[in-house]
Amino acid sequence: MKAIAAVLPLVLAIGPAAALDIENAKRINRSCALCHGNYGQGTPGTMSPRLAGLPAGYLAKELRFYRDGVRRYPPMVIASSVDSMTDKDIDDISEYLAGVNLRTLNLPEIPAYTKGDAERGEDYFMDECKGCHRTTGLGKPEKDIPPLAGQYGSYLFNQMKRFQEKDRHHDNDPEDETFDGLEDEALDDLVTFLTTLPAHGPLDKVEPFSLQAESPPESEMTDAMIALGTGGTTAAAQATGGALKATKIAGRFKVLPTGDILLTPINQDMRPVTGLSGDFEVTEDGLLFIPR
């Protein structure tokens, strides 16, 4: 067998051992799925929003609010048993849901919200909201600012009303005035505009990575950046009928203490490389994928 590094080039990074207990997260998600769907995709209505892909820090913060009584919604607390969750439970389910990628799961599109005027809503959004949620409405994950694009309109309207009534604090600020004085018509305009925004940003172009000349000790090989090769002329691509061509599959993987391999985003669509199989080994040059 000939090692073909181009098939699965990696850049190895030294990082701490993975903290996510994926089995614990899956167990907790069975309760979440009762309302939010198996993938955290949410359901139409005012109380079961999309959770998949929201920043882990934001999810963890809100779950702690529910657990500690800062936010109140008894049906959710009862169904999820969040009031008995440990900090580790909350961190596990938050990391798990944050890693779910809904882009390629062929789920029904979120219905448009048509009660308002999108142009008027855009004017307000660009004046008041884009600083935090960006012009795309996709938020700032690195700052735990959630996306508004890709969320159910009726849920967004409901939460804005709660911000108005100070039943929930926008930006964690009891004095925030973003929604004060807005009539329902203006809120409808804003939500209508938000539901016109794409739920996902454009796919980044996947560039093949070169293998590191040096690799960390095997005990530290727990976190790596992964990108499948995009060329269609390698021996491996030929062996799979060119399935590797322009897959644009990219993400991160971690070897968990249990020995399991965790892919992030969790629900990436791997169908473009169906049938690809092989062995791998960690060498002095990095991780090599060896097709059968």
Image: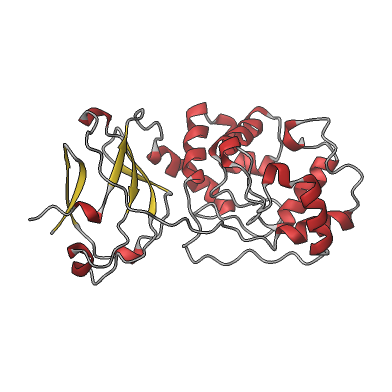
Residue 167 or residue 286, whichever sits in front: 286
Corner quadrant of residue 150: bottom right
Residue 98 or residue 214, whichever sits in front: 214
> Residue at 82% across / 47% down in the picture?
161
Q: Do we see residue 81 in this rendering?
A: no
Residue 84, given in percent of the width and then of the height, sits at 55, 30
Q: Is residue 78 left or right of residue 87?
A: right
> Residue at 69% across / 30% down in the picture?
69
Q: Do we see residue 157 in this rendering?
A: yes
Corner quadrant of residue 42: bottom right
> Height in image: 270 above or below 9?
below
- Quadrant for the C terminus, please: bottom left
Residue 212, given in percent of the width and then of the height, sits at 25, 39
> Height in image: 32 above or below 174?
below
> Residue at 81% across / 63% down in the picture?
119
Q: Is residue 168 left or right of residue 20?
A: right
Q: Is residue 23 left or right of residue 73?
A: left
